[in-house]
Image (spheres, grey):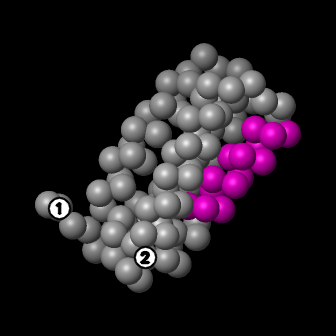
């Protein structure tokens, strides 16, 4: 099993925030790559679950995965879309504070 330091994991999730934020311009520009980009991010987050030992952080990652799956498949208003993206960003941002249990 591969383990990562708390600092490495915190840095990784900071990078994930940028990847989630990138969904906004992709959607606003109506690019055909939106679903592919979100699906790729979902796969990456699913893989990251093995490196998160803190139960609250694991639940947070699962919440973000589920929200992103919804965004890639459901109909939504632009307002709802933005709200869900920013919710994901807030959740991932909180993980940094929960990493003490790694």
The residue lying furthest to the top in this view is: 32
Q: Which residue is mark 1?
A: 2
The residue at the point 58 percent across, 66 percent down is 93
Quadrant occupied by the N terminus: bottom left
Residue 49 highlighted magenta (yes or no): no
Work out how far the residue at label 1 is from the one at label 2, CA to CA, in angstroms.
17 Å
The residue lying furthest to the left in this view is: 1
Helix, strand or loop for disc 2 = helix
Q: Which residue is mark 2?
A: 99
The residue lying furthest to the bottom in this view is: 100
Q: Which residues are magenta?
A: 79-92
Q: Quadrant of residue 101?
A: bottom left
Q: Nearer the viewer, residue 18 or 35?
A: 35
In the depicted structure, whether residue 99 falls above or below residue 87: below
The residue at the point 49 percent across, 56 percent down is 61
> Do the CB atoms of the residues marked 1 and 2 lie less than 8 Å apart?
no
The residue at the point 49 percent across, 52 percent down is 62
Q: Nearer the viewer, residue 57 or 26?
A: 57
Mark number for residue 40? none
- Magenta span: predominant SS is helix
Residue 81 visible in the current orientation = yes
Report whether 23 appears left or right of 30: left
Mark 1 closeness class: few <14, some 14–19, many ≥20 residues within 10 Å: few
Residue 18 visible in the current orientation = no
Q: Position of residue 74 (x, y in %)?
A: 68, 26
Q: Position of residue 91 (x, y in %)?
A: 61, 62
Helix, strand or loop for disc 1 = loop
Q: Position of residue 65 (x, y in %)?
A: 52, 45
The residue at the point 56 percent across, 35 percent down is 69
In the depicted structure, whether residue 22 falls above or below residue 86: above
For marks 1 and 2, the one nearer the N-term is: 1
């Amino acid at each position: 099993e591969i383990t990562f330091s708390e600092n490495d994991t915190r840095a990784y999730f900071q990078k994930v925030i940028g990847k989630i934020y990138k969904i906004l311009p992709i959607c606003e520009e109506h690019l055909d790559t939106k679903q592919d980009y979100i699906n790729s991010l979902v796969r990456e987050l699913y893989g990251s679950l093995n490196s998160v030992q803190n139960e609250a952080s694991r639940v947070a990652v699962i919440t973000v995965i589920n929200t992103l799956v919804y965004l890639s498949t459901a109909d939504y208003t632009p307002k709802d879309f933005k709200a869900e993206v920013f919710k994901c960003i807030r959740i991932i941002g909180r993980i940094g504070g929960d990493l003490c249990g790694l």
